[in-house]
């Protein structure tokens, strides 16, 4: 499969807007390692090869372990703390919002773990990665290794 368009060059102001959201999330007080888990998990759900490649590399650079990344698909059974589990439950619910509304139990868990301000930041983190996924997937943005293999 070859890449279709590079939307980043077609609408630079859109790229700048998403970049500003990314910057806001990074400065929101959420831990970089937590943002990495959110980015990888949402990208797994959405099937975004480029974002999985990028955010897995970032997670490892921020000190995440390969073992935890391998177990991220089964986070509810893996070696994750309650704050991470609450964030991952929120990530899944918001990423799959077209399938079902965010359950009250998921909201209550996330609110208990993050408080109002933190939950707002968490929600923006999930929105941001889903937006990036939706830029990459329809235009078949591929990781560099996949590009070289063609």
Image: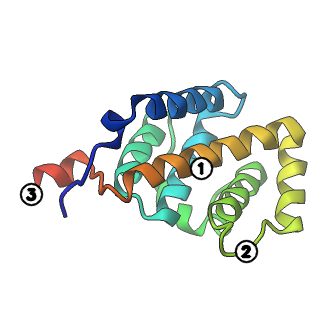
Task: Residue under label 3, please give it.
Answer: 150
Is the Cβ of the residue at disc 2 closer than 8 Å to that at disc 1?
no
Kindly report the distance in space between the C-alpha atoms of the residues bearing marks 2 and 3.
38 Å
The tag earlier along the polypeptide, 2 or 3, is 2
Kindly report the distance in space between the C-alpha atoms of the residues bearing marks 2 and 1.
19 Å
Q: At numbered mark 1, what does the secondary structure look like: helix, strand or loop? A: helix
Q: Tag 2: Cα neighbours inside 10 Å, few (<14), some, or many (≥20)? A: few
The correct choice, above or below, for 66 with respect to 17 in the image is below
Q: At numbered mark 2, what does the secondary structure look like: helix, strand or loop? A: loop
Relative placement, left or right, of 13 versus 148 is: right
Camera-near label (2 vs 3) is: 2
Residue depicted at 30% across the width and 51% down the height: 141
Which one is in front, 147 or 62? 147
Task: Residue under label 1, please give it.
Answer: 38
Task: Residue under label 2, please give it.
Answer: 100
Q: Position of residue 11 (x, y in %)?
A: 39, 35
The correct choice, above or below, for 31 with respect to 71 in the image is above
């Amino acid at each position: 499969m070859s890449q279709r368009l590079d939307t980043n060059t077609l609408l630079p102001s859109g790229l700048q807007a998403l970049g500003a959201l990314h910057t806001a999330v990074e400065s929101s007080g959420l831990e970089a390692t937590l943002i990495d888990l959110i980015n990888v998990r949402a990208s797994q759900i959405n099937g975004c090869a480029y974002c999985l490649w990028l955010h897995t590399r970032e997670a490892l650079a921020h000190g995440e372990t390969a073992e935890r990344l391998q177990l991220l698909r089964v986070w509810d059974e893996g070696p994750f703390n309650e704050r991470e589990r609450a964030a991952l439950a929120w990530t899944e619910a918001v990423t799959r919002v077209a399938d079902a509304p965010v359950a009250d139990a998921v909201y209550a868990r996330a609110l208990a773990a993050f408080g109002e301000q933190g939950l707002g930041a968490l929600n923006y983190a999930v929105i941001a990665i889903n937006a990036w996924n939706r830029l990459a997937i329809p235009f078949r943005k591929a990781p560099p290794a996949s590009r070289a293999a063609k």
